[in-house]
Amino acid sequence: MAKAKEKYVAYISTYTQGDSHGIKISDVDMENGVFKEKDKVKITNSSYIAISHHRKYLYSITDFGVESYVIQKDGGLEFLNFAPIQGMRGCYVSTDYTDSYLFVAGYHDGKLTVLKLNEDGSIGEITDAVFHKGLGSLAERNFRPHINCARMTHDNKYLLVADQGMDHVKAYAFDLERGTCTLADIIRSELESAPRHIKISKDGRFIYIVHEFNCMIDVYSYEEKDGNPYFDKIQSIDTCKVGKGSSNAACALSFSADYNYLLSTNVGDNSIVTYKVDQTTGLLEKIFCLPVSGDYPKDADFFPNNKFLVSLNHETNDMTFFRINLEEGTMIMNGPAMHVDVPNCVIFHKIEE
């Protein structure tokens, strides 16, 4: 009996400029490496989306708060509820590894918001709110806190919060009973580097931080000893070259489904860089850095089979698709671009049949 082909949908979050549908849903053609539009969801300015770890619910940033959705069997989304965050619109959302709490990062107001998640997936009350304080080093943009990412370590003990304005990542000990944060450590980046996004290796031993302004990825080993987190930098590797007067800026950071590869996008350079990940040492080896045929690749991701890539080009209002060979280091454009207004984020979701 032939093995059934795996089916996926892709969720694309967008800003809503003349279109009230901020989340687009596409069927994923795994053999040909393209998307086919399936449905769209009415939501305002979906800056970022996340799926719960048990894959039952999707959460999205919207104006003044967050929204929750039940993921249907066919990949469709059914609205659950809206919850306010008592602050400006967030730019990043994630859950802890028990799917008991939702974390919202606030770029505009430098605020971290923690919300309780109910058993039915809906969003409950705010359990903690932390405003970052201080002055950064770059007066033009980073003169105050800008939180860009909030992500739990895989042991569910520490919440890592990237502050682009302050050039550091704060590690908060997280109280699962009360849903509150206590500062435990600070991972300090280079001045004017602007840490943007954080990813964590499959086994949880390595932390990857991409920096927007200096176009570097810092790799840290992570372990907990005697109730304290320990982070040791083991590598810094560039995403693209940054010369004098350069407008290049690193943006997205995505693992392949098998965690064997990592990619970052470069705005200005308008390219995608891919790396081979050494699962034992955590170190990265650059494979290629090639153009995306679009402007401002705000996000990108590998198809789950590692045979294709998609780039979300924020300023040219489209997605471009590429056939890739990660062993040979090639990336070739795969068909025409697909129109989508001001895309922000893409997530692949496997449909269970």
Image: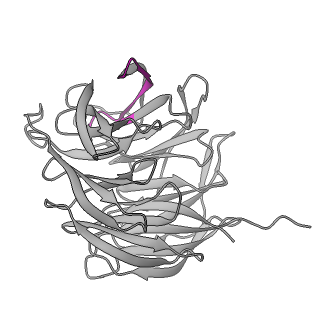
What residue is rendered at 25% in x and 39% in y? 181
Examine the structure image and report whether residue 224 is included in the region drawn in magenta. Answer: yes
Q: Residue at x 55, y 74 (%)?
A: 75
Residue at coordinates 25% horizontally, 43% vertically from top-left?
A: 180
Is residue 335 toward the left or the right of residue 342 in the image?
Answer: right
Q: Is residue 37 left or right of residue 178?
A: right
* Number of numbered tags placed on the structure image: 0
| In the rendered image, the vertical position of residue 57 relative to residue 174, given as above or below | below
Q: Is residue 195 visible?
A: no
Judge by depth and name the residue closer to the eye, 282 or 330.
Answer: 282
Task: Tell me: residue 122, above or below residue 104.
Answer: below
Q: Residue furthest right?
A: 1
Which quadrant of the view contains residue 13?
Answer: bottom left
Nearest the viewer among 220 and 236 is: 220
Return the residue found at the far front: 177
Q: Which quadrant holds the C terminus? A: bottom right
Magenta stretch?
209-228
Magenta-colored stretch includes residue 5: no
Q: Main secondary structure of the magenta part?
A: strand
* Residue 283 rendering spot, x and y as whole percentages: 53, 25
Q: Name the residue nearer the viewer: 99 or 246.
A: 99
Residue 51 shows up from this direction: yes
Q: Quadrant of residue 27?
A: bottom right
Q: At x 36% / y 55%, what residue is drawn?
A: 298
Q: Position of residue 87 (x, y in %)?
A: 13, 59
Residue 85 at x, y = what percent? 19, 61
Q: In the visual, does 210 lie left or right of 246?
A: right
Q: Is residue 299 above or below residue 176?
A: below
Say which quadrant the N terminus sits in: bottom right
Q: Quadrant of residue 86?
A: bottom left
Along the line of sight, the residue nearer the viewer: 284 or 287: 284
